[in-house]
Image: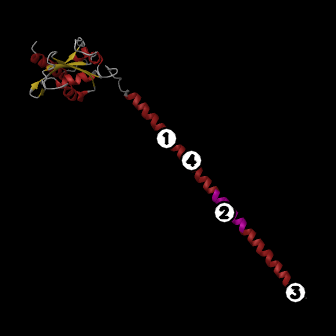
Amino acid sequence: MNPLTNMKNVLKLSEQELHSNSKTSWHDQYRNSAWVFIGGLPYDLTEGDVICIFSQYGEIVNINLVRDKASGKQKGFCFLCYEDQRSTILAVDNFNGIKILGRTIRVDHVEDYKAPKESKNMTAETARLHEEGCAENPVKIKTEPPSPKSKSSNHYQDNKALIKKVKKEKVKKEEKEEKRKRKSKSNKSKGKKKKKRSRSTSSSSSSSSSSSSSSSESD
């Protein structure tokens, strides 16, 4: 099939899916593959250029920009692998049919990608990169985010913990205030006792002085 016709057919599939109420998607048949095919690339683009363009829809873990074995020049198409398989859906829906440097590119899913065969000039490290990519463990599908129910339960638990913390702080504050009041009362009672003692000492001294004066007068 003509590449341009293939590109238009993919666009039609995406447009039909937007207007339909179907729960299934034509992308579902590729859910086990995180690879996409990119055709019609300008010949002066490098692997880094392709990664810069396509990384806006997900982390890229592998790329195979097909080159001529003799000259080393790229042939205008490549295979690219995302970390998250769902990124392939975004790439196909948004990049298929766009123009890069005046050339219309074609982006489609790859159901069963096979690494290129080793050539005489290929090193063991290059062969390993073609096979495994630059990531430790490419992930096909990430875990789904927590359901709204679990989110609400977590929110309830957080609120409960916050209320408990506020109550605890309030009790501590009340206990501190009670201690302060007790301390002030004890200080007041001590002050009263001191005043009584000073009064009793003054009265005793005055009585002793009066008795001494009376004895002198009798003499």
> Crowding near pointer 1: few (<14 within 10 Å), some, many (20+)?
few
Label 4: which secondary element: helix
Measured from the top left, where is residue 49 in percent x and y?
Answer: 19, 28
Dot 4 surroundings within 10 Å: few (below 14), some, or many (20 or more)?
few
Location of residue 111 by image quarter: top left
Q: Amino acid at mark 3?
A: Ser
Tell me the amino acid under the disc marked 1. Answer: Ile
Name the residue that disc number 4 marks: 172
Measured Cα–Cα span from mark 2 to mark 3: 43 Å
Mark 2 = which residue? 188
Q: Residues within 10 Å of mark 2 (few under 14, many from 20)?
A: few
Mark sitting earlier along the chain (1/2): 1
Q: Earlier in the sequence, mark 4 or mark 3?
A: 4
Q: Which residue is tagged 3?
A: 216
Q: Looking at the picture, how far across and down is residue 201, in whole percent?
A: 77, 72
SS at circle 2:
helix
Provide the residue span drawn in magenta: 183-194
Figure quadrant of the C terminus? bottom right
Q: Which of the marked residues, 2 or 3, is nearer the chain's N terminus?
A: 2
